[in-house]
Amino acid sequence: MAVVVDRYIGIDVSKDVLDVSVQWMGKPRERWQCANDSDGIAACVARCMSLKPKLIVLEATGGYQDLVTADLASAGLSVVVANPRLTRRHAESHGRLAKTDRVDADDLARYAEENHPEVRPLPDAQSRAFSALLTRRRQLVDMRTAEMNRRHHAQGEVKKGLLKHIKWLDAEVKRLDDELHDVIRNSPVWREKDDLLRSVKGVATVTSTTMLALLPELGTLNRAKIGVLVGVAPMNRDSGKRKGTRRCWGGRGTVRAVLYMATMAATRFNPIIRAFYQAKLAEGKLPKVALVAAAHKLLTILNAILKTGKPWEDRLKTA
């Protein structure tokens, strides 16, 4: 009788090369390399499909993993893009201190076999393009802020050049805003979600588009998991009789930054968030701590609205 084994694959991704390691029963069994281009990725996908792995794990590497991840998922394989900090800590827990591409691929395969990270839906091509537009908009806004700060100390021709560049940046941001708006309004699914999110007082265009592009899990997870994913859920730090201060850490920084800005507006114009924020201040919480708690509250509301499909006006009360 043939023994069925669960195979796990780790892929270390660099700009030009994919290092692949196949593991089962706690040991690496097969390794190979291929180019990180269309031909190499096609060969990698074909070979992975022939192995019928239970799970494939890659690390987030600044976008170099996007194409191979999308092709593996399109082939029907279970793929997880793991947080490099988590995979590195897992390797160190096994005493694996060396770091090479081959070793990293082995560590990713071991991480897959021992931890079985949750497979989440990956963004499709339209979502990736939408996310790229949003990222470019954020880059331009940061660039504009830097140029405006330089303007105050500039003189003569330098100041004229800065003003000209700021004007161009304003036009580019406006163009991207229009393009993002068109993408959302031309998609029935995104248009419905955008309308639901923007029905909440304090949530405007930037918050809604950021949530749609960078937090596709919104509306599919429970309140605890979505809070951890964004990084606004406080974590206990207790040991023995010591009761440490709960802290928020990790999560998706870009989403969290936009959520904070929306929360600041909501503490003024959204009656539920304002009352919640004021109650935290009355309890003696520091303003920043109260704002984080209010951000978690707002995120929970947005998650519930997308999950139920009911806009803010139709909700009598949100717990």
Image (cartoon, rainbow, N blue to C red):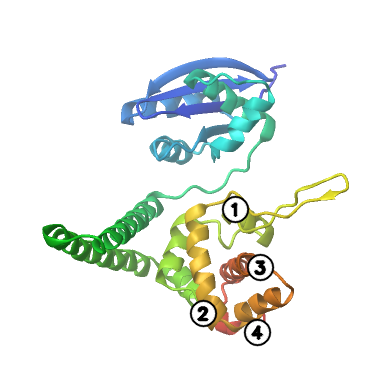
- What is the CA distance from the residue labelled 2 to the residue labelled 4? 14 Å
Q: Residue at x 47, y 63 (%)?
A: 258
Categorize mark 1 by other alpha carbons within 10 Å: few (<14), some (14-19), many (20+): many
Q: Position of residue 235 (x, y in %)?
A: 71, 52
**Tag 2 or tag 3, which sits nearer the N-term?**
2
Q: Foreground: 311 or 16?
A: 16
Q: Which residue is mark 2?
A: 201
**Tag 1 or tag 3, which sits nearer the N-term?**
1
Q: Position of residue 105 (x, y in %)?
A: 53, 24
Q: Are marks 2 and 4 in contact (CB under 8 Å)?
A: no
- What is the CA distance from the residue labelled 4 to the residue labelled 1? 27 Å
Amino acid identity at mark 4: Leu
Q: Which secondary structure lies at badge 4?
A: loop
Q: Which secondary structure lies at badge 1?
A: helix
Numbered mark located on residue 229 in the image: 1
Numbered mark located on residue 286 in the image: 3
